[in-house]
Image (cartoon, grey):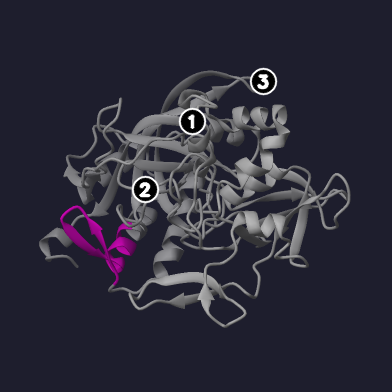
C-alpha cells in the first residue's frame, strides 16, 4: 500500500497496497507519481520474441537477494495453484522451477552475455499489453518508497495526530455472494460498515487505540496511502510501522478531487504541490483528507523493511507492484523505462534509461489492469525523489521457463 493512491480513483488491494498497498497487505506507500490516469480497456498479456539484449543496471547481489525472496514465497504456495500467463495456466511448481533455474545459473557468476543467452535459450517472453494513452500501448511506470516521519509514543505538542492500531471491533464477514467484507457489529448486533475516516477522526471512535503520534495530519495521511514507513522518535529511536488492516471502505482520491474541483491542474498534482496547498490553506486540511473515507490501521513493523502483499520483504529497485488479478505474480519480470539522475542539491538533472530484472511482490490501489507497474525504491532521499516524480512510459515483460506450453499447462 503506496502514494499513487492520492490520485487513484479506487483502491483495490489492501493496501496502496500499505499504494502503499498498498489491497493488498502492501507494506508501503505507493507514491505520488501515479497522477490521475483513468481506467481504459487493457490489452491482454501476449507472447513476444526474446528481447535483443537483456541488460541490467543494478548489481547482481540485489538480483540474487530478490530471487531468493521470490523463491521463498513460491515455496509456500500450493504446487497446483495456477496463474494466467497469456493463453496458458501455469502452475506454481513451474514458476518455482523458472526462478530456481535462473538463480542456480546466476550463482555460477555468468557474464552478462552468458546470462542473456541462457534466458533467450531456456525461457519464453510475454509482454504486458500496456494502456492506451499518449505513449501508445506502453505501461505507465510509477514509484513508491518507505517514508520517514517524526513521531512520539505519547500525545504532546507538536505530536497530536495519531496512527491507530487495528481495533478489536473490526471484523470480517463472508456475505451470501461469497465475498468477504470488513465491518463491525452495531448495538443491535447487526453487521454494518465500519466507521469512515471522518467518523474516526471527528467522533473519537478509536480513542485508546493509538499506536504513535505524528506532527502533521498530511504525514499521517501519506502513511495511510503508503501503508508503511518509519517513525523517528524523540529519543533517537527509529521504529518501522506497517499495514495492519483497513476499515474496508472504498478509496477516494484527494488528487482527483483537487483536479475535479479545479483547485489544481492534473499536470501539477504531486505530493509536494498538495503539501504546499495544504500549508497555504490549513483550514481545508481536514475536509480534503476526509474526502477519502478509507482508513488504515498500523502495527510495529519488520526490521527487515516493508513487506509486499506476497509477505516477502521488498527489495529496493527490484520489487514491483502490479495488479495480480490481471498480471502474473510470483514470476520473473523485466522492466524497461527511465530513472532520474539526481545532483548533490537533490534536483533531477535528467532521466536516463532503466533496464532491469524486477519481481512482482506487491500490489497497490492505483495499480489496476495490465498497464500499470509501480517500482519500490526503498528509503532515503533518492528513493523519495524517484518515487515522487516517476510517471513514465515503459515496457514490462514476464519470463517463464520453456516446457509448460508443450504439456497443456503444467
| Closer to the eye: label 3 or 1 | 1
Give yes or no for contact between labels 3 and 1 (Cβ–Cβ under 8 Å). Answer: no
**Residue 300 is covered by the magenta coloring:** no
Give the residue number, with chain letter if any, for mark 2. Answer: 368
State which tag comes first along the sequence, 3 or 2: 3
Quick one: which residue is furthest to the top in this view? 349
At numbered mark 1, what does the secondary structure look like: helix, strand or loop?
Answer: helix
In the image, is residue 263 above or below residue 224? Answer: above
**Residue 96 is covered by the magenta coloring:** yes
Give the residue number, with chain letter if any, for mark 3. Answer: 344
Q: Residue at x 71, y 60 (%)?
A: 203
Give yes or no for contact between labels 2 and 1 (Cβ–Cβ under 8 Å). Answer: no
Q: CA distance from mark 2 to mark 1?
A: 20 Å
Q: Pick the residue in front: 59 or 260.
A: 260
Percent position of residue 170, x then y: 59, 72
Quick one: which residue is furthest to the front in this view? 188
Percent position of residue 308, x then y: 51, 56
| Closer to the eye: label 2 or 1 | 1
Percent position of residue 258, x then y: 53, 33
Q: Which quarter of the picture shows residue 153?
A: bottom right
Q: Residue at x 29, y 39 (%)?
A: 116
Give the residue number, with chain letter if any, for mark 1. Answer: 259
Q: CA distance from mark 3 to mark 2?
A: 35 Å
Q: CA distance from mark 3 to mark 1?
A: 33 Å
Q: Pick the residue in front: 190 or 350.
A: 190
Q: What residue range appears in magenta?
A: 81-98
State which tag comes first along the sequence, 2 or 1: 1
Q: Is residue 107 visible?
A: no
Q: Which mark is residue 126?
A: none
Percent position of residue 245, x then y: 57, 64
Amino acid at each position: 500500500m503506496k502514494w499513487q493512491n492520492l490520485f487513484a480513483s479506487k483502491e483495490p488491494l489492501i493496501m496502496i497496497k500499505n499504494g502503499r498497498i498498498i489491497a493488498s497487505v502492501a507494506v508501503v506507500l505507493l507514491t505520488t507519481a501515479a497522477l490521475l490516469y483513468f481506467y481504459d480497456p487493457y490489452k491482454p498479456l501476449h507472447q513476444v520474441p526474446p528481447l535483443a539484449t537483456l541488460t541490467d543496471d543494478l548489481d547482481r547481489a540485489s538480483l540474487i537477494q530478490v530471487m531468493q525472496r521470490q523463491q521463498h514465497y513460491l515455496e509456500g504456495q500450493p504446487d497446483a495453484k495456477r496463474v494466467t500467463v497469456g493463453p496458458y495456466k501455469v502452475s506454481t511448481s513451474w514458476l518455482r522451477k523458472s526462478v530456481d533455474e535462473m538463480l542456480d545459473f546466476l550463482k555460477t557468476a555468468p557474464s552478462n552475455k552468458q546470462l542473456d543467452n541462457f534466458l533467450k535459450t531456456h525461457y519464453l517472453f510475454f509482454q504486458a499489453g500496456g494502456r492506451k494513452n499518449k505513449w501508445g500501448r506502453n505501461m505507465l511506470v510509477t514509484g513508491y518508497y518507505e517514508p520517514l516521519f517524526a513521531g512520539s509514543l505519547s500525545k504532546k505538542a507538536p505530536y497530536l495526530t495519531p496512527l491507530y492500531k487495528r481495533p478489536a471491533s473490526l471484523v470480517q464477514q463472508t456475505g451470501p455472494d461469497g465475498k468477504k467484507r470488513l465491518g463491525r457489529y452495531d448495538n443491535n448486533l447487526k453487521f454494518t460498515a465500519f466507521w469512515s475516516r471522518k467518523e474516526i477522526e471527528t467522533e473519537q471512535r478509536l480513542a485508546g487505540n493509538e499506536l504513535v503520534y505524528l506532527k502533521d495530519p498530511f504525514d499521517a495521511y501519506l502513511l495511510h496511502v503508503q501503508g508503511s514507513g518509519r517513525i523517528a522518535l524523540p529519543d533517537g529511536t527509529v521504529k518501522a510501522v506497517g499495514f495492519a488492516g483497513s476499515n474496508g471502505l472504498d478509496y477516494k482520491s484527494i488528487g482527483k478531487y483537487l483536479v475535479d474541483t479545479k483547485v489544481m491542474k492534473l499536470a501539477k498534482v504531486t505530493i509536494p504541490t498538495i503539501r504546499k496547498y495544504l500549508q497555504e490553506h490549513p483550514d481545508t486540511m481536514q475536509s480534503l483528507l476526509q474526502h477519502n473515507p478509507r482508513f488504515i490501521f498500523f502495527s510495529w513493523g519488520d526490521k527487515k523493511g516493508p513487506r509486499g502483499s506476497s509477505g516477502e520483504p521488498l527489495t529496493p529497485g527490484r520489487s514491483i507492484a502490479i495488479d495480480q488479478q490481471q498480471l502474473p505474480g510470483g514470476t520473473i519480470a523485466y522492466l524497461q523505462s527511465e530513472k532520474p539522475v539526481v545532483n548533490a542539491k537533490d534536483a533531477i538533472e535528467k532521466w536516463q534509461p532503466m533496464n532491469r530484472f524486477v519481481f512482482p511482490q506487491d500490489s497497490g490501489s492505483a495499480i489496476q489492469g495490465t498497464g500499470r507497474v509501480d517500482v519500490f525504491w526503498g528509503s532515503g532521499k533518492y528513493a523519495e525523489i524517484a518515487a515522487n516524480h516517476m510517471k513514465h512510459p515503459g515496457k514490462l515483460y514476464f519470463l517463464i521457463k520453456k516446457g509448460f506450453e508443450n504439456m497443456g499447462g503444467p
